[in-house]
Image (cartoon, helix red, strand yellow):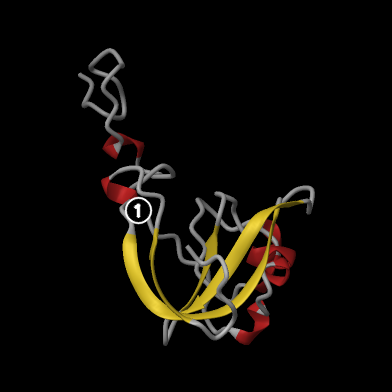
């Protein structure tokens, strides 16, 4: 827990949802860069909190609730100046319009987990088989 901590404090914490093997928690060490607000991407309403960790070559924004960063104001609300970075990585299926406008290059990385775009890799067990695209159909 980061309760009672402040910017500059050294920390060793676990990050990740820990729901399954694709979202296992990972231990990270670094220092607290800043605390901020987590705002809803549509309404701008505060829905939680963020902490930005300085892990050396990487700054990591950690949220206390799942929410996509889809606008530049999401970064600003978290206390982060997105323009100060050469590379920004967001975990979502595609870039939302505002982020796409500022991206010099967008790279889609197919990854396992709840937003896996390769649906044939999802472990469907309660559907009739064969079912396309999970199975080859004759």
Q: Residue at x 34, y 51 (%)?
A: 23
**Residue 51 in picture, x, y percent from top left:** 57, 69
Q: Residue at x 61, y 72 (%)?
A: 103
SS class, disc 1: loop
**Residue 123 in picture, x, y percent from top left:** 27, 32
Picture quadrant where residue 137 is located: top left
Placement of 39 over or under 50, stated as above or below: above
Name the residue that disc number 1 marks: 111
9 vs 21, left or right, is right
Relative depth, front residue between 12 and 67: 12
Relative depth, front residue between 29 and 61: 29
1 vs 36, left or right, is left
Relative depth, front residue between 26 and 9: 9
Placement of 110 over or under 129, stated as above or below: below
Placement of 94 over or under 78, stated as above or below: above
129 vs 17, left or right, is left
Q: Which class describes the residues within 10 Å of circle 1: few (<14), some (14-19), or many (20+)? A: few
Count of numbered badges drawn on the protein? 1
Q: Which quarter of the rendering shows the C terminus? A: top left
């Amino acid at each position: 827990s980061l309760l009672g901590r402040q910017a500059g404090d050294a920390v060793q914490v676990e990050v990740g949802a820990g729901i399954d093997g694709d979202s296992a928690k990972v231990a990270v060490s670094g220092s607290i860069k800043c605390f901020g607000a987590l705002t809803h991407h549509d309404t701008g309403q505060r829905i939680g909190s963020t902490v930005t960790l300085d892990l050396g070559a990487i700054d990591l924004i950690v949220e206390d609730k799942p929410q996509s960063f889809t606008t530049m104001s999401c970064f600003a609300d978290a206390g982060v100046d997105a323009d100060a970075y050469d590379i920004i990585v967001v975990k979502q299926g595609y870039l939302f319009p505002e982020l796409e406008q500022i991206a010099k290059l967008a790279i889609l990385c197919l990854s396992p987990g709840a937003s896996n775009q390769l649906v044939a890799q999802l472990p469907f067990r309660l559907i009739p088989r064969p079912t396309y695209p999970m199975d080859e159909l004759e």
